[in-house]
Image (tube, grey):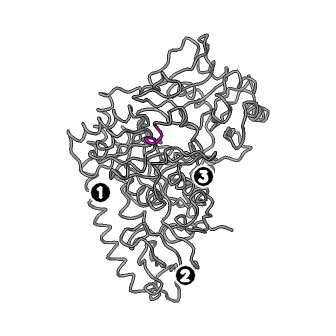
Amino acid sequence: MQTEISSRFTCLCSIHLLHLVVCTAFAAGPADLVVRHANIITVDPNRPRAEALAVTGGKFISVGSATQIESLIGPHTTVLDLTGKTVVPGFNDAHTHPAPVYAPDSRWAAVDCSPKNVRTIDELVAALRRKAERIPLGQWINGSRYQETKLGRHPTRHDLDRASTNHPIFISHSSGHQSVCNSLALELARVTRDTPDPPGGKFVRDAQGELTGLLQERAAGLVRAAVRREVAPPEAETISGYQECFRQYLQRGLTTVQVAGISPSSARLLEKARTDELRIRLYVMFSEDALAETLERKQGGRSDDSVRFGAIKLFHGNSLSAQTCWLSKAYANPPDYFGVPPGRTQEALDQLILKIHTNGLQAAVHANGDREIDMLVTAFERALRRAPRADHRHRIEHGSVLTAELLPRIKAAGLIVVPHSYLWEHGDKMENYGAWRWDWMHPARALLDQGIPIAGHSDTPVSAAEPLLRIQDMVTRTSAEGKVYGASQRITVEEALRAWTLGAAYAEFADDRKGSITAGKLADFVVLADDPSRVQPETIKDIMVEKTFLGGRAIFETK
């Protein structure tokens, strides 16, 4: 397997060189598309800015001045004159969780419990009750994205019982790492006050030892398993829901999304959802449960430009925004709390990382607390000592709480960090960590200064898959309420844009063919109404995406 993957990368390099030769030949004749009089931010260090580009066969063939490109305009060339509007490479979300977007009246649609829909516990109960009134008795009610910091506290099973005692109810936190269910859901899952906490999880109890309904980390999986026993949505409706999800991605300028931790069957549904009009590119990271099947089918070897495989997404640790990640020093509130320890030992983690590494796959590992990350870096160091491998590009997903001691080790191991940029939505979750820690949370500046590659991501639905909002977040480190968290970790617009384009492409072994506006690369690019590097930083999120091009073809345009 390792030999096969190594051969794959050698082959890709050869293909890239061939593309450059072919593109040079194309440059002698008319282009399919020419964009001129634009403000092009190329993210190519050899030519950071340009005013024109040409595309043939779905790839950039020339990037430069309007005069240089003029000779490539022929009688059948489409010419787009942008009169100074900004062009950037297509955005690439390096860690996301595509979910079907069902119609609000669909029985499969989850109740939106986010702050834009509910701001109090009573409003939450009312929204769940309305759903209960529209569906048959006994059907599960799912909700998503509640935030206890906006509601004032976590809901309890008793709150959810007010919505219905005839429907099992399960609502997930905005982090996805804790949930709340009603009493009927606990009963169906056979969870009682005497049920022990699973490794890496916790059934939260009140002072009398009674279950509150709050489920942290792996405890939620025991109840969620009962939800899964319900009949699944029809495949056609799920595919339609994924297509609406893809449509929303393209409207925000996303031309690639990296899917973090799914099964092969779910990956097949995502592939089916891609149509000629919704040809978003996918990089699939299979879940740990699919590792054996991935190795058996050798799916790490697939490397076309539409849907690619090559990574295994693991969990080692918990959540920053759920305040369950495992720390070496206590939280500020409560002061004697260190988080929820991972369910896996160092020995087990070492063995798992070594297995992925020696089979030529990429390991993309969710870890947030510095104590979790220390274990993970140790596992990577041991694997690399036992089986040196160049250009492995193993990844730490999120890497939220770091230390000065961890950075040089991450650099020496050649790891990529995919840091959060969700302070706009979740800045208030930082409060319980203590102000002294904020400059070491999502420390993009420190990572870049250390020479560690970073990739931008939304982790949607944890935060919105809106690249311009996420770029603003990395530049300002400011919450929606106007509070700055860790100002020393701000980075420039250009650095944030690179993280969301070329940095993310590097994280999926695709920087040789996308991520910058460079001759020979795939012609994925976005037209913006303004230049994010020239507006007030707090308004970057408001810039309109006017057009999204994938392979030189306009796949989204504002009306």
The image's mark for residue 8 is: 1
Q: Quadrant of residue 193?
A: top right
Asked whether residue 440 is drawn in magenta, I would say: yes
Mark found first going from the N terminus, 2 or 3: 2
Q: Which residue is mark 3?
A: 245
In terms of sequence position, does the residue under pointer 2 or pointer 1 come before the other?
1
> Which region of the structure is painted magenta?
437-441
**Residue at point 60% right, 34% down?**
173
Looking at the rendered structure, the secondary structure element under dot 1 is: helix
Report, in whole angstroms, how far the alpha carbon at label 1 lies from the one at label 3.
31 Å
Q: Residue at x 42, y 30 (%)?
A: 327
Q: Position of residue 293 (x, y in %)?
A: 38, 40
Name the amino acid, label 3: Cys
> What element does badge 2 sit on?
strand
Q: Position of residue 154 (x, y in %)?
A: 64, 28
Q: Nearer the viewer, residue 449 or 177?
A: 449
For residue 82, what is the image quadrant? bottom right
> Is 423 within the magenta?
no
Q: Amino acid at mark 1?
A: Arg
Question: What secondary structure characterizes most of the magenta part?
Answer: helix
Distance Cα–Cα, label 2 vs label 3: 29 Å
Q: How many residues crowd around disc 3 within 10 Å: few (fewer than 14), some, or many (20 or more)? A: some
Tag in front: 2 or 1? 2
In the image, 261 versus 324, the foreground residue is: 324
Gap between marks 2 and 1, in whole Å? 35 Å
Per the rendering, the mark at residue 460 is none
Crowd band around label 1 with a 10 angstrom C-alpha radius: few (<14), some (14–19), many (20+): some
Q: Residue beneath label 2, please?
A: 78
Judging from the image, what secondary structure is the residue with disc 3 in? helix
Residue 280 versus residue 115 in the image, above or below: below
